[in-house]
Image: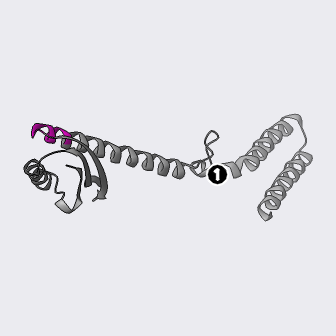
Amino acid sequence: MTAIKAYLLRLVLCGFLVSLAGALLRGKRAARAVTLCGGCLMILTTVRPLLRVDLSRLPDLMTGMTKAERAEAAREKNDALLRRLVEEQTAAWVEEKGKSLGMQLTCTVTARTEAGAFVPDSLRLTGSWTEDKRAALSDVLSRELAIPPEKQRWVGG
């Protein structure tokens, strides 16, 4: 509240100064010059607090979020999209490898964050296969995706 009081006091004092300067001068030209200068001074005094406003910290009128909040929301959305892409593309790759080995399976992938990137962490494989084909695919997954057999959950058989 003290900031508002100080602002109003500055306006009153500025108005008083402009009036006093106008009363002291005689002549039409001098009065016009003082009126012009006084008006400019009043405008600057009135608008000065707006110059200190940090517009990036104000909430957006449409979303109600600040710039930092919008950036955080965008980062979270991008992370979710990247995670989903990694999981979907890895699942498609694993299903294709299984198909090339003659297996009928579907794969669900869970990704984790590692050094700022998403990498496949664990797999859930459902379908039908023989033990030899399962061992062969498990070996491929361990070598190429670095997913150990402990993190490969095989459902079916």
**Which stretch appears magenta?**
95-102
- Is residue 157 part of the magenta span, yes or no? no
Residue beneath disc 1: 53
- Image quadrant assignment for residue 91: top left
Q: Nearer the viewer, residue 132 or 10?
A: 132
| Residue 113 spot, x, y in % from top left | 31, 57
- Residue sitting farthest toward the bottom: 2
Colour approach in the figure: one colour
Q: For the point 89% across and 51% down, which residue is it?
A: 20
Q: Which residue type does callout 1 highlight?
A: Val
Left/right of residue 48 with respect to residue 134 in the rendered view: right
Left/right of residue 142 with respect to residue 39 in the rendered view: left
Q: For the point 75% across and 42% down, which residue is it?
A: 40
Q: Nearer the viewer, residue 97 or 129?
A: 129
- Within 10 angstroms of label 1, few (less than 14), some, or many (20 or more) residues? few
| Residue 64 spot, x, y in % from top left | 63, 45
Pick the quarter of the image with the N terminus: bottom right
| Residue 101 spot, x, y in % from top left | 9, 40
